Image (spheres, rainbow, N blue to C red):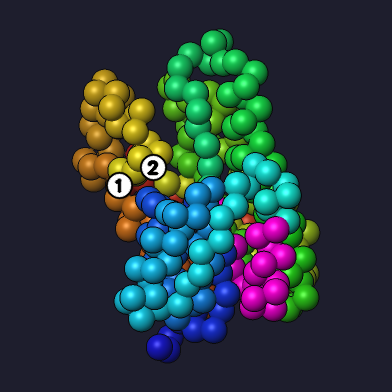
Amino acid sequence: MTGMFDLTGRVAVVTGASRGIGEAIATAYAQQGAKVVVSSRKLEGCAAVAEAINAAGGEAVAIACHIGDMDALNGLFAQVEQRFGRLDVLVNNAATNPYYGHILDTDLGAFQKTVDVNIRGYFFASVLAGRMMRAGGRGSIINVASVNAVRPGPMQGIYSITKGAVLNMTKSFARECGPEGIRCNAILPGLIRTKFAGALLADEKQLKHYVGDNPLRRVGEPQDLAGAAVFLASDASSYVTGEFLVVDGGFLI
């Protein structure tokens, strides 16, 4: 495989890759030649995705990791180091949104869980990955944020707040890690048809509003994010860092 989007020989870790957006990105990376680490909380789901990639002629391994657990996070990157000895791409995709309701009714448990995964998890995954990338002289960190980061979604207060933090995190890593050859960018998906978005998809009023306010008049599919993720991982984006790539069907226009 040749061309500016070629990922042959590169090692990529994709979190939250047992289904949805993460699965689509992991599959696309393997199709472009990358060695993919498929990671999420439950090994069974990761293994199924990795097996499908391998059966299609790609190369993937499954490693379970809850990014809200620092021991598990350290273990993930230790295994990547031991198995591959390098890391070229990290996709921070694993996220949580345990509370769908009015912001004034947010409880401490839901708040803390969302912060631990969506901010702390992304941050320390980037730190651990960045240290490996620094040793290799290059790398790409891709944060999957959300359009909610710039246009907070109704009934999604703390989730929107954490995704806003991810944008500033992206710029901070881009600025400080650029001299190390490490780029950091974010993808901002709109509403995507996944299990993760189940509460919003089940809210007929909100769904009708989203589709009606979307120039393409549809909900996105996980595969709609794959091309953006390949671009940001590849040499096609070698002079792009600290940027936000919106993939939302025009919702934010």
Where's the N terminus, which quadrant? bottom left
Name the image quarter holding residue 100: top left
Tell which residue pokes out farthest to the top in this image: 104
Residue 97 coordinates in the image, percent (x, y): 50, 32
First in sequence: mark 2 vs mark 1 = 2
Tell me what residue is drawn at x 56 percent, y 10 percent: 104
Is residue 191 shown in magenta? Answer: no
Q: Nearer the viewer, residue 88 or 181?
A: 88
- Marks 2/1: CA distance? 7 Å
> What secondary structure is found at the residue carrying circle 1?
loop
- Can residue 144 be seen here? no
Where's the C terminus, which quadrant? top left
136 in relation to 114, above or below: below
- Can residue 94 be seen here? yes
Bounds of the magenta span? 75-92
The local crowd at label 1, few if under 14, some if 14 to 19, many if 20 or more residues have their Cα within 10 Å, is some
Q: Judge left or right: residue 84 versus residue 71.
A: left
The local crowd at label 2, few if under 14, some if 14 to 19, many if 20 or more residues have their Cα within 10 Å, is many
> What secondary structure is found at the residue carrying circle 2?
loop
Residue highlighted by disc 2: 190
Residue 38 coordinates in the image, percent (x, y): 50, 62
Tell me what residue is drawn at x 74 percent, y 78 percent: 137
